[in-house]
Image (cartoon, rainbow, N blue to C red):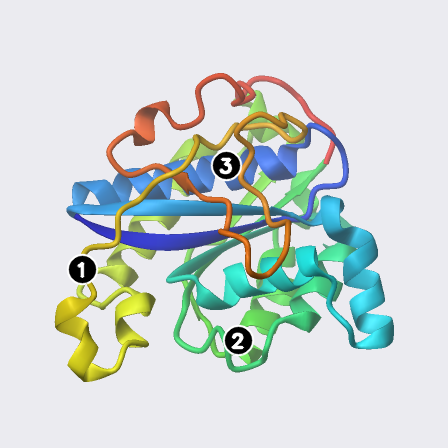
Amino acid sequence: MTARRIAVISAGLSEPSSTRQLADALARASAIELERGGEAAEIEVIELRHIAPDVLNGLLTGTHAAPLANALRVVEDADAVIAVTPIFSTSYSGLFKMFVDLIDRDALTGTPVILGATAGTPRHSLAIDYAIRPIFAYLHADVVPTGVFAATADWGGQGTDAEGLPGRIARAARELAGKLAGSAPRSFRELPAASESAAGEIVAGGAAVPGSEGADSGTARAGGSPSAPRPTASLGGAASRAFDGGFVPMGDLLPH
């Protein structure tokens, strides 16, 4: 079974947060859709709040501490990206934008991306299209048509969208899986032609991704030295169980 590496960027500031909850839900749905197509998913979650000082220092000095360098490598090497930010003052958070500014401008060319955002009110639902989508268009990413916005009311099932938040999440996940279908995993594409036959199968592995921030046990996030093995979390073959033990029920209202 082919494994796809999906980098998940969560820019939530609280612990736990609805931003991380949405990021986890999108990752889980994407893994399920990929599994239906005969592919596994390696999910690697980057909690920006954990590397915020390194992000700021990276912009100020141009040097990348090991956790930041590892996080950027996870994103730039991924087959697909899920990026979720809280909405502050009608736009993405400063931390989210600072991190995206550090991504190599050619690294995401053609990479499928799901965009997500959270806020207290549905009045900010257009922020994905007028604020966030243009950034990834500049990076030449292949952004799926469905941007997933979650207001506080959506978590309690009281949103105004007839489709509902679960439906929007599922639709975005199907679009992501569709863009990945038929393309070679990035790790295969980067191999010299003579070595492709010896590449072998990428096997998903690692611990499950918990659904809320701050659960240290099993949490997949960027960290350590650039030479250390990247923390991974496999949803392939066990997507329906991947978030057990840490996933916050959608009925709970969380800060961003």
- The residue where tag 1 is placed is 200
Question: What is the three-letter code of the residue carrying label 1?
Answer: Gly
Quadrant housing residue 68: bottom right
Residue type marked 2: Ala
Q: Is residue 101 above or below residue 41?
A: below
- State whether residue 31 is above or below residue 72: above
- Closer to the eye: label 3 or 2: 3
> What residue sits right under mark 3 in the picture?
24
- Disc 2 marks which residue? 137
When asked about the image quadrant of residue 182, the answer is: bottom left
In the image, what residue occupies the spot 49% across and 16% down? 245
Judge by depth and name the residue closer to the eye, 58 or 151.
58
Give residue 92's position: percent from left, percent from top: 72, 57
The residue at the point 74 percent across, 45 percent down is 49
Viewer-nearest of discs 1 and 3:
1
Residue at 55% from the left image edge and 30% from the top image edge: 159
Separation of disc 1 and disc 3 at Cα?
29 Å
Going by the numbered disc 3, the residue's amino acid type is: Asp
Quadrant position of the C terminus in the picture: top right
Mark 2, secondary structure of its residue: helix
* In-front residue for pair 94/121: 94
Q: Residue 63, how many percent across, how many down?
A: 77, 73
Residue sitting nearer the eye, 198 or 131: 198
Q: Position of residue 153 (x, y in %)?
A: 62, 27
Tell me: residue 37, above or below residue 152.
below
Question: Dot 2: few (<14), some (14–19), or many (≥20) neighbours within 10 Å?
Answer: few
* Dot 1 and dot 3 residues touching (CB under 8 Å): no
